[in-house]
Amino acid sequence: GQSLEQPSEVTAVEGAIVQINCTYQTSGFYGLSWYQQHDGGAPTFLSYNALDGLEETGRFSSFLSRSDSYGYLLLQELQMKDSASYFCAVRDGGRGKLIFGQGTELSVKP
Amino acid sequence: GAGVSQTPSNKVTEKGKYVELRCDPISGHTALYWYRQSLGQGPEFLIYFQGTGAADDSGLPNDRFFAVRPEGSVSTLKIQRTERGDSAVYLCASSFTVLDTEAFFGQGTRLTVV
């Protein structure tokens, strides 16, 4: 089976940098994704890592270490609008079916 | 449409009743997924379709849940004899193919069973 662990809550101040970690256990690995979800909103795709290393997209970066079954999402220059829940997810069986972690609620304070 | 559309946005039903939740995916997307999300939890996989066929329904909790996608576009999730434990947000997502790494989610249907 698949399981993912991530912190339940993280708090940071505007302008700061925050890292949200995710560890996973899978029977086969086909990539780690990150989604953002604002309260009452739809999850939206942020990034996907299939290979080790860092992927950068604007203020957001995502890192993967397959040997450690570990990844993280790095958010820089935090803004109030970044307050949301962040989910890591693995693809099950190489198809689009996603298995999500429990989510990390990020609160950005002024 | 521009995005994944789900209707209704909210549904309140009495225990024991039957409900249907509709998902209209992005035009041209062949893969469609249903998830269920409880408060403070991550989305939980229910079923996905590749075209008209259910490719994986392993997440459906029991035989009260059923989903169809007869023409390979709109999908309906059907729940019979609803129970209070079925209360959750039901999310639909679509992608161009099942191999795509990005899924596009709808706003969800909030189901409340009273």
Image (cartoon, coloured by chain):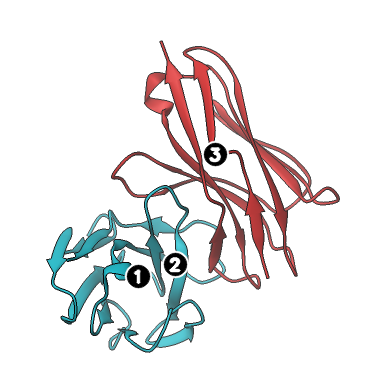
Chain colours: A red, B cyan
Could you tell me residue B80's position as x and y percent? Answer: 24, 85
Q: Would you name the residue on which mark 3 appears?
A: A8
Q: Are marks 3 and 1 on the same chain?
A: no
Question: Pointers 2 and 3 in contact (CB under 8 A)?
Answer: no
Left or right side of A54 for A74: left
- The answer to which of marks 1 and 2 sits earlier in the sequence is 1
Could you tell me residue A83's position as x and y percent? Answer: 41, 28
Disc 1: which chain? Answer: B
Could you tell me residue B21's position as x and y percent? Answer: 22, 72
Q: Disc 1 versus disc 2: distance between alpha carbons? A: 7 Å
Query: Given the current orientation, which residue lies at the most extreme right position?
Result: A67
Nearest the eye: B83 or A100: B83
* Vertical arrangement, residue B59 with respect to residue A14, above or below: below
Q: Would you name the residue on which mark 2 appears?
A: B96
Check disc 1 and report its element: helix, strand or loop: loop
**Mark 2 or mark 3, which is nearer to you?**
3
Check disc 3 and report its element: helix, strand or loop: loop
Q: Residue A75 appears in which quarter of the rendering?
A: top right
Q: Would you name the residue on which mark 1 appears?
A: B28
Q: Disc 1 marks which amino acid?
A: Gly
Residue at 44% across, 76% down: B48
Residue count near mark 1 (Cα–Cα under 10 Å), binned few <14, some 14–19, many ≥20? few
